[in-house]
Amino acid sequence: MHVVVAANRWSEIRPSMRDLLAPSWELRLGDPMESNSGAGGRGVPHQVGRGLTANQTPFPVGLPRLDSSSATEDVTTATKAAVEEIATFWTGPAAPEVRMLPTRLSAENCRGRGVTWTVVLP
C-alpha cells in the first residue's frame, strides 16, 4: 500500500506525522527554505512536471492524458474518455477492483506490513 501526503510546505504536516513519512519527493517550492531534501530546492529543474527525490535524483511527472492535450482543466473528462476507449478494444482479463481503505488507519497498524509513505510537496 502506498500513501501519498501532499502539502504546500513541510510545516503544514505535524512533526509526529513527518517522522513516519519516509521517502519524500519535492516539486519546485515557493520558498527554498521549506525544502526537506537538503538542497533547498536548488536542484529542481525550472520545468513543469519535474521534482527531486530525497536523495537528490530528479524525476519527471506525467499528465495522465492520451489525447495529446496538455490542459489540466478537463483531465477528469479526458481520463474517463480514455478508459472508455481502452475498454472498447481490450480483450484481456479485467483488472481487480481497487479495495477501499477503512475510514481510519493508524500508522501503528501499518508498521512492518509493507506500507510505503510518500510525501509530495507542490
Image (cartoon, rainbow, N blue to C red):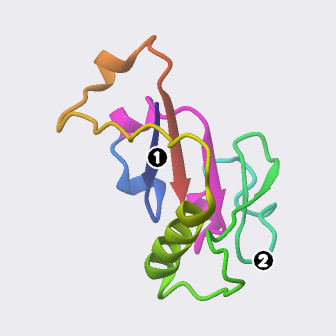
> What residue appears at the point 46 percent right and 72 percent down from the top-left corner?
80
- In the image, residue 15 above or below residue 64: above
The image quadrant that residue 28 belongs to is bottom right
Would residue 73 be found to the left or right of residue 66 on screen? left
**First in sequence: mark 2 vs mark 1:** 1
**In terms of depth relative to the viewer, which is nearer, 12 or 79?**
79
Percent position of residue 64, x then y = 61, 68
**In terms of depth relative to the viewer, which is nearer, 74 or 113?**
74
Percent position of residue 62, x then y = 69, 66
Q: Amino acid at mark 1?
A: Val
- In the image, residue 102 above or below residue 36: above
The answer for how far apart the CA atoms under marks 2 and 1 are is 22 Å
Percent position of residue 19, x then y = 45, 30
Task: Tell me if residue 26 is in the magenta stretch.
Answer: yes
**In terms of depth relative to the viewer, which is nearer, 99 or 121?**
99
Give SS at disc 2: loop
Q: Which residues are magenta?
A: 15-35
> What residue appears at the point 52 percent right and 66 percent down from the top-left corner?
83
Q: Which residue is mark 2?
A: 47
Q: Give the number of the disc on residue 4.
A: 1
Q: Give the number of the disc on residue 88.
A: none
